[in-house]
Image (cartoon, rainbow, N blue to C red):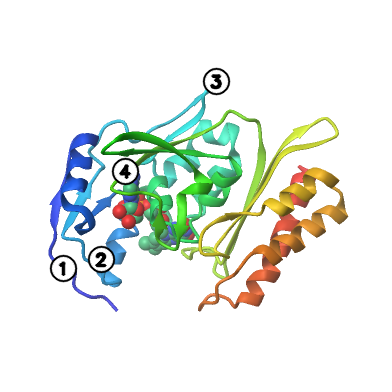
């Protein structure tokens, strides 16, 4: 049901320090606005009513995507899903991240939705989170006391909750480690629906095996999660059929799936197992 939006003060700072000052001044009454595809829906339909909306889109330096062989892949928080999915840097180095961004909503949504907003909204189903977890992304966060780096695994605290405390996510850096990966979105509808399960896996191929095995899931726990036990198993036993099936079972067991209108907990657990097996098997074949 569409409710009417409560009046709010729209603020459009032109610098990061101005934005942080506004955030500090207005505290919990303020919300940061990036693409608005979550925030505005929340304000229109879910009773969210910030008194101050701080639009960060006019701040220079928060967008852009670039790759440096020594530093890695840097993505500004305001890079849109369309930009991430089309970026030659992303596609060349971490194609599965481009695929994940390309799974979000529709073209219209992707043209507005930012990668930073996807993480800060902290939905368990956040589409880019499993791929970024597999890539060991390090998030850069600016606050009144300066800038800090947060490993993506430390970023999520629960549904809709992050470690941000009066801070603004400015971007992320993916270390320059060679990886091949895969992201599989499972959703009963083909388009315009969030993931019922998102499963990502990535590895660094080396002679005779894999290094840096990563398996991460979305929409099956209060936050996007990595499945360390399953990663460890593949590291120890290698990418045999048996090890892959065992890793799938572990992922199914470690997930603590939610029950909602989209799928039951049992269905999600079973699908997690299947998707992880599929992801690892496809990596073997690729
Ligand atoms: C029709 C539709 C379909 C969708 N489909 C999908 C889907 O398939 N998969 C999916 O994952 N999502 C989906 N979404 C959700 C949404 O598009 C994404 O989560 C999007 O990436 C959010 O980015 P945004 O820039 O629009 O964030 P906003 O709505 O601007 O912000 C989201 C939240 O993050 C905070 N925030 C944003 N940027 C920052 C920052 N830099 N620092 C601190 N806080 C910040 C805001 O205060 C707000 O709380 C869909 C949305 C719609 C409307």
Residue that mark 1 sits on: 6
| Residue 162 appears in view | yes
Residue that mark 3 sits on: 70
Please rate how many residues cluster around mark 1, counting C-alpha atoms within 10 Å: few if below 14, some from 14 to 19, many from 20.
few
Please rate how many residues cluster around mark 3, counting C-alpha atoms within 10 Å: few if below 14, some from 14 to 19, many from 20.
few
Residue that mark 4 sits on: 168
Pick whichever, 75 or 229, lies toward us.
229
> How far, Cα to Cα, is label 3 from label 2?
42 Å
Query: Going by the image, does 113 lie left or right of 72?
Result: left
Q: Is mark 4 within 8 Å of ligand 1?
A: yes
Element at label 3:
loop
> How far, Cα to Cα, is label 3 from label 1?
48 Å
Sooner in the amino-acid sequence: mark 3 or mark 2: 2
**Which quarter of the rendering shows the C terminus?**
top right
CB within 8 Å, label 3 to label 4: no
Sooner in the amino-acid sequence: mark 3 or mark 1: 1
* Residue 201, placed above or below residue 274: above
Residue that mark 2 sits on: 43
């Amino acid at each position: 049901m569409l409710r009417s939006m409560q009046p709010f003060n729209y603020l459009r700072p032109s610098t990061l320090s101005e934005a942080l000052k506004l955030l500090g001044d207005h505290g919990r009454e303020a919300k940061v606005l990036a693409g608005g595809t979550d925030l505005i829906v929340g304000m229109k339909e879910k009773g969210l009513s910030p008194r101050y909306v701080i639009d960060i889109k006019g701040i220079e330096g928060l967008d852009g995507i670039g790759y440096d062989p020594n530093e890695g892949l840097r993505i500004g928080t305001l890079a849109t899903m369309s930009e991430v999915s089309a970026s030659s840097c992303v596609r060349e180095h971490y194609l599965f991240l481009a695929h994940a961004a390309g799974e979000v909503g529709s073209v219209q949504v992707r043209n507005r939705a930012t990668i930073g907003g996807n993480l800060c909204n902290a939905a368990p189903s956040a589409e880019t989170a499993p791929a970024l977890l597999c890539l060991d992304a390090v998030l850069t966060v600016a606050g009144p006391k300066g800038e800090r780096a947060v490993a993506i695994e430390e970023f999520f605290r629960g549904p809709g909750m992050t470690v941000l405390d009066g801070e603004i996510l400015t971007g992320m850096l993916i270390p320059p480690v060679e990886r091949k990966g895969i992201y599989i979105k499972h959703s009963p509808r083909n388009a315009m629906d969030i993931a019922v399960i998102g499963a990502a896996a990535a590895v660094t191929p080396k002679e005779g095996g894999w290094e840096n095995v990563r398996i991460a899931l979305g929409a099956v726990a209060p936050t996007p999660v990595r499945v360390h036990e399953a990663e460890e198993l593949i590291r120890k036993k290698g990418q045999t059929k048996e090890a892959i099936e065992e890793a799938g079972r572990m992922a199914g067991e470690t997930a603590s799936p939610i029950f909602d209108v989209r799928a039951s907990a049992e269905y999600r657990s079973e699908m997690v197992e299947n998707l992880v097996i599929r992801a690892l098997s496809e990596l073997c074949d690729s």
